[in-house]
């Protein structure tokens, strides 16, 4: 059974940084494109960033472009989300997701096959 475990969330002041990690077990990490999504209270889950299986293709939501960086380490079965210049509107539960794909990386919820439990990120203004 594939499991995704996020870590690294917390409380940070506006302008600060956090680095999220997502460790994947029970599957073949190199077979997955990986994505990060977030969901704020009362809102739908939204795309943040994604990365293809080999890291060759990266995609970002316009709202985080230039501030967030997605990366992966296939030797450690882990994907990361470096979040800089955080804003209060970045406050949400952040979810890691895996898509069975060696072609590209999806940008919609329905494209992903496995999900983590989420980690809370709170940015105080």
Image: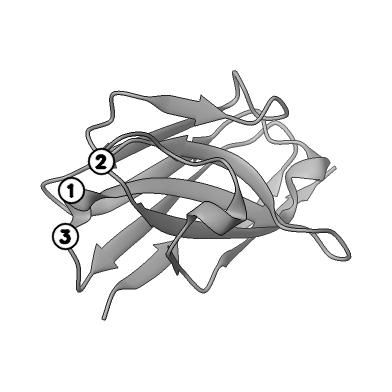
Under circle 3, the secondary element is loop
| x, y percent for residue 84 | 58, 30
| x, y percent for residue 96 | 47, 57
- Residue 109 placement, left or right of 102: right
Residue mark closest to the camera, 1 vs 2: 2
Tell me whether the residue at label 1 lies in contact with that at label 2, contact meaning CB atoms closer than 8 angstroms.
yes
Q: Residues within 10 Å of mark 2 (few under 14, many from 20)?
A: few
Question: Does residue 9 appear in this view?
Answer: no
Q: Earlier in the sequence, mark 2 or mark 3?
A: 3
In which quarter of the view is residue 89 placed? top right
| x, y percent for residue 15 | 70, 31
Q: Residue furthest left?
A: 75
The residue singled out by tag 3 in the image is 28
State the mark number for residue 102.
Answer: 2
Compute the Cα span from label 2 to label 3: 11 Å
Residue 80 in the image: above or below residue 41:
above
Q: Residue at x 26, y 81 (%)?
A: 1
Tell me whether the residue at label 3 lies in contact with that at label 1, contact meaning CB atoms closer than 8 angstroms.
yes
Q: Residue furthest right?
A: 42
Q: Residue at x 36, y 68 (%)?
A: 4
Q: Earlier in the sequence, mark 1 or mark 2?
A: 1
Residue mark closest to the camera, 2 vs 3: 2
Tell me whether the residue at label 2 lies in contact with that at label 3, contact meaning CB atoms closer than 8 angstroms.
no
Q: Residues within 10 Å of mark 1 (few under 14, many from 20)?
A: some
Q: Choose between 59 and 66: the one closer to the eye.
A: 59
The residue singled out by tag 1 in the image is 30
Q: Residue at x 57, y 37 (%)?
A: 17
Under circle 1, the secondary element is helix
Compute the Cα span from label 1 to label 2: 8 Å
């Amino acid at each position: 059974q594939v499991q995704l475990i996020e870590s690294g969330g917390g409380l940070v002041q506006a302008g600060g940084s956090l680095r999220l990690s997502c460790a994947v077990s029970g599957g073949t990490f190199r077979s997955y494109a990986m994505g990060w999504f977030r969901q704020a209270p009362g809102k739908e889950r939204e795309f943040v960033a994604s990365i293809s299986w080999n890291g060759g293709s990266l995609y970002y939501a316009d709202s985080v472009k230039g501030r967030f960086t997605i990366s992966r380490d296939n030797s450690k079965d882990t994907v990361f989300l470096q979040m800089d210049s955080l804003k209060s509107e970045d406050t949400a539960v952040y979810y890691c997701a895996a898509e069975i794909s060696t072609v590209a990386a999806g940008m919609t919820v329905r494209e992903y096959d496995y999900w983590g439990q989420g980690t809370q990120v709170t940015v105080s203004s």
